[in-house]
């Protein structure tokens, strides 16, 4: 048993560190790495109890209550994927069961070290943790399946949703395992579920599954975000000095371009490219890029994403929508990170802060 716990504990730590040191999305990856960090702390604590006391009963009953943080970490990850923030009051509400359980666990650990007889109280604590974990695992486990069931979004977000559903599925399996344990205990059946090994097996599969999807996100993200690569640098105006686009012609190109963007809103297509624009306007790509560079000091992607930010501002002003990630997608952005980056650069606010400023001024 000790060897199994050592292996799964190291795997939890490895998973947490891999996600943390390869983070691309600060909030999302932070909560995801924190989830696996909490699992590591929980397993390390249980392993330490087993090694120090060499008592299987204490190992079973001194829970540490860390498992009551699994669900809140998943919830925070999902909120971050959706672009939502959690108030301090809501955060404390979600973590209260853990805080209560951890406080009692400290007292019980002290009683064991001081050789105090608190067996009855420890038994109550044991069932409090199990029942709390049963409802917590089920409630938080089913949450991603409910919240994401009607959303039709791009591949990148679908992969992030898949991670939340993998974790939620693991939680549901843990809640089913606890329920079966209670069921067998109530009817006094002589069935051994092998709960410890089943729990470890669920976690091990979860670790590898999440890392697999996480690597796919990193690879896909590198392919899908050309607008946040060096192409963002404004092309040197000197590059076009020799071609000498006439000022009058330049103004006509910009006028045609602005009118087309205002009327057709092609920027809402997340895959819209310079080739598409040249074809739609019937103009050479060189003339478009020259007009943008010399007239506005922008390249095509900057112009495109500026239009998308203006669209997102209109959506924030006219819709009662707190899901800022959806706002970004509906404005034409491919990823949350690109949306947040441009919104901050162009407005000086994050989408949530901008929404709050509208509510204050209104």
Image (cartoon, rainbow, N blue to C red):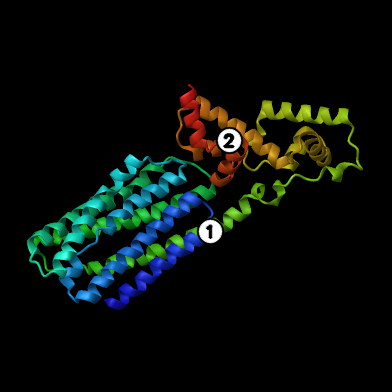
Residue at 34% across, 44% down: 91
- Residue 338 percent location from the top left of the image: 59, 45
Q: Is residue 34 left or right of residue 128?
A: right
Q: CA distance from mark 1 to mark 2?
A: 25 Å
**Residue 191 seen in the current view:** no
Dot 1 corresponds to which residue?
216
Dot 2 corresponds to which residue?
331
Q: Is residue 88 left or right of residue 280?
A: left
Occupied quadrant, residue 92: top left
Above or below residue 127? Residue 59 is below
Does the CB distance between marks 1 and 2 fall below 8 Å?
Answer: no
Q: Is residue 148 left or right of residue 95?
A: right
- Residue 353 percent location from the top left of the image: 49, 35
Residue at 71% across, 49% down: 231
Residue at 42% across, 55% down: 32
Q: Which mark is residue 57?
A: none
- Other residues around mark 2 within 10 Å, as few (<14) / some (14–19) / many (≥20): many
- Residue 228 percent location from the top left of the image: 64, 48
């Amino acid at each position: 048993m000790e060897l199994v716990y050592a292996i799964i504990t190291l795997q939890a730590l490895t998973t947490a560190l891999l996600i943390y040191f390869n983070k691309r999305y600060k909030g999302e990856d932070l909560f995801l790495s924190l989830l696996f960090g909490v699992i590591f702390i929980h397993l390390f604590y249980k392993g330490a109890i087993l090694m120090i006391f060499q008592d299987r009963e204490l190992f079973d009953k001194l829970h540490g209550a860390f498992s009551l943080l699994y669900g809140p970490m998943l919830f925070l990850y999902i909120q971050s994927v959706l672009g939502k923030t959690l108030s301090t009051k809501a955060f404390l509400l979600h973590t209260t069961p853990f805080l209560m359980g951890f406080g009692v666990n400290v007292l019980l650990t002290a009683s064991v070290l001081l050789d105090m007889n608190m067996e009855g109280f420890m038994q109550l604590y044991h069932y409090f943790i199990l029942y709390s974990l049963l409802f917590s695992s089920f409630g938080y486990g089913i949450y991603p399946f409910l919240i994401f069931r009607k959303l039709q979004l791009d591949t990148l977000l679908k992969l992030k949703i898949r991670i939340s559903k993998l974790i939620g599925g693991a939680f549901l399996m843990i809640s089913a395992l606890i329920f079966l344990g209670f069921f067998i205990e109530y009817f006094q059946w002589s069935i051994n579920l092998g709960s410890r090994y089943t729990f470890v097996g669920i976690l091990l599969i979860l670790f590898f599954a999440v890392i697999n999807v996480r690597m796919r996100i990193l690879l896909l993200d590198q392919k899908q975000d050309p607008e946040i690569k060096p192409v963002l640098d404004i092309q040197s105006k000197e590059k076009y000095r020799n071609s000498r686009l006439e000022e009058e012609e330049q103004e006509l190109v910009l006028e045609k371009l602005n009118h087309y963007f205002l009327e057709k809103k092609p920027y809402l297509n997340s895959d819209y490219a310079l080739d598409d624009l040249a074809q739609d306007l019937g103009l050479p790509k060189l003339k478009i890029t020259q007009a943008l560079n010399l007239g506005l000091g922008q390249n095509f992607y900057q112009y495109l994403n500026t239009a998308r930010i203006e669209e997102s501002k209109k959506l924030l002003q006219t819709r009662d929508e707190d899901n800022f990630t959806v706002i970004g997608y509906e404005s034409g952005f491919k990823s949350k990170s690109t949306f947040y980056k441009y919104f901050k650069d162009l407005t000086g606010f994050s989408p949530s802060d901008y929404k709050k400023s509208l509510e204050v001024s209104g």
